[in-house]
């Protein structure tokens, strides 16, 4: 599922207000993104063709979660930009910055949780 940045911006509105009537989506996209009705409907059509949303009777419903999309996008970024190396991605992301103790502990817990699932 390849979703562009523009499509993702509209998806954020859809996820937040789902299910959402197309007229309300147009109004929210205009106020939040400055998009015209024709732009919204073009992006809705593309997202429908990609199987990301369903549009029936002027009601837009997401077919994928934000988490699913973010997982795909981050996986693609790591795969193409960092030769599939999560440690290389994290090192680049941190880029000499510092983690708070709480952030470091949260990352350690995530790694431990994932590792535990894999070993079972």
Image (spheres, rainbow, N blue to C red):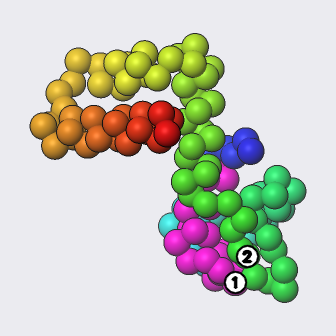
Quarter that holds the N terminus: top right
Please provide percent x and percent y for residue 81.
56, 19
Picture layout, residue 80 above or below residue 107: above
Residue drawn at the location 65% of the way across and 80% of the way down: 19
Q: Can the viewer see residue 117 in this picture?
A: yes
Q: Secondary structure at mark 2?
A: strand
Left or right, 112 with respect to 13, comes to left
Asked whether disc 2 touches disc 1, contact meaning CB atoms under 8 Å apart, the reply is: yes
The chief SS type of the magenta part is helix
**Which comes before the other along the chain, label 2 or label 1?**
1
- Residue situated in front as seen by the camera: 86 or 77: 86
Please provide percent x and percent y for residue 70.
55, 46
- Residue situated in front as seen by the camera: 92 or 9: 92
Quadrant for residue 41, please give it: bottom right
Tell me which segment is drawn in magenta: 6-26
Please provide percent x and percent y for residue 29.
60, 69
Residue 60 in magenta?
Answer: no
Which residue matches tag 1? 21
Which residue matches tag 2? 60
């Amino acid at each position: 599922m390849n979703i562009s940045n523009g499509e993702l911006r509209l998806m954020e509105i859809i996820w937040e207000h789902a299910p959402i009537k197309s007229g309300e989506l147009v109004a929210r996209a205009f106020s939040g993104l400055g998009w015209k009705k024709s732009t919204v409907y073009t992006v809705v059509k593309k997202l429908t063709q990609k199987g990301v949303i369903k549009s029936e009777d002027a009601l837009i419903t997401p077919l994928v979660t934000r988490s699913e999309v973010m997982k795909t996008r981050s996986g693609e970024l790591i795969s193409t930009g960092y030769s599939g190396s999560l440690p290389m991605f994290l090192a680049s992301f941190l880029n000499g910055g510092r983690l708070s103790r709480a952030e470091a502990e949260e990352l350690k817990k995530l790694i431990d949780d994932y590792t535990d699932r894999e070993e079972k």
